[in-house]
Image: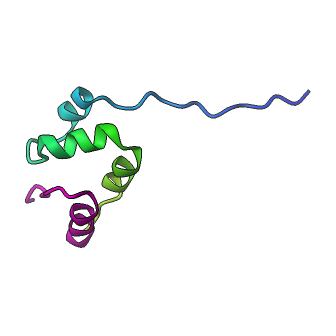
Amino acid sequence: EVVEETPETSAPLTYDELRLRLPPEVSDDVVKLLASSDEALLEFSNIATQQDVNEFNVKYGVELVLPQV
């Protein structure tokens, strides 16, 4: 017998959930964008360099600033 499994899809994160998880340096307009766009959320999660931040800002018209370590 073959059992096919369908991938589980999780509910998208709400603004409030994201706001709680992200540092205060991430502005509310960026959090709103992430809550409303799966594509933006995916790109945000893949940010690794300042160049990634710059490209994200240009593409989405926001001013994301990474916390200074």
Q: Position of residue 16 (x, y in %)?
A: 22, 27
In the rendered image, residue 65, in percent from the top left (x then y), is placed at 12, 58
Disc count in the image? 0
- Whether residue 24 sits left or right of residue 30 in the image: it is left
State the scheme by which the image is colored.
rainbow
Q: Residue at x 19, y 40 (%)?
A: 22
Question: Horizontal and vertical percent for residue 4?
Answer: 78, 31
Residue 18, by quadrant, is top left
Q: Residue at x 9, y 59 (%)?
A: 69
**Quadrant in which the N terminus appears:** top right
Q: Quadrant of residue 21?
A: top left
Q: Residue at x 34, y 31 (%)?
A: 13
The vertical placement of 12 against 31, above or below, is above
- Residue placed farthest to the front in the image? 61
Numbered range of the magenta stretch: 50-69
The quarter holding residue 43 reads bottom left
Q: Residue 57 in magenta?
A: yes
Position in image of residue 44 (x %, y %): 30, 53
Q: Is residue 4 left or right of residue 55?
A: right
Front-most of 48 and 60?
60
> Quick check: is 66 in the magenta stretch?
yes
Which one is nearer the viewer's eye here, 61 or 44?
A: 61
Q: Residue furthest right?
A: 1
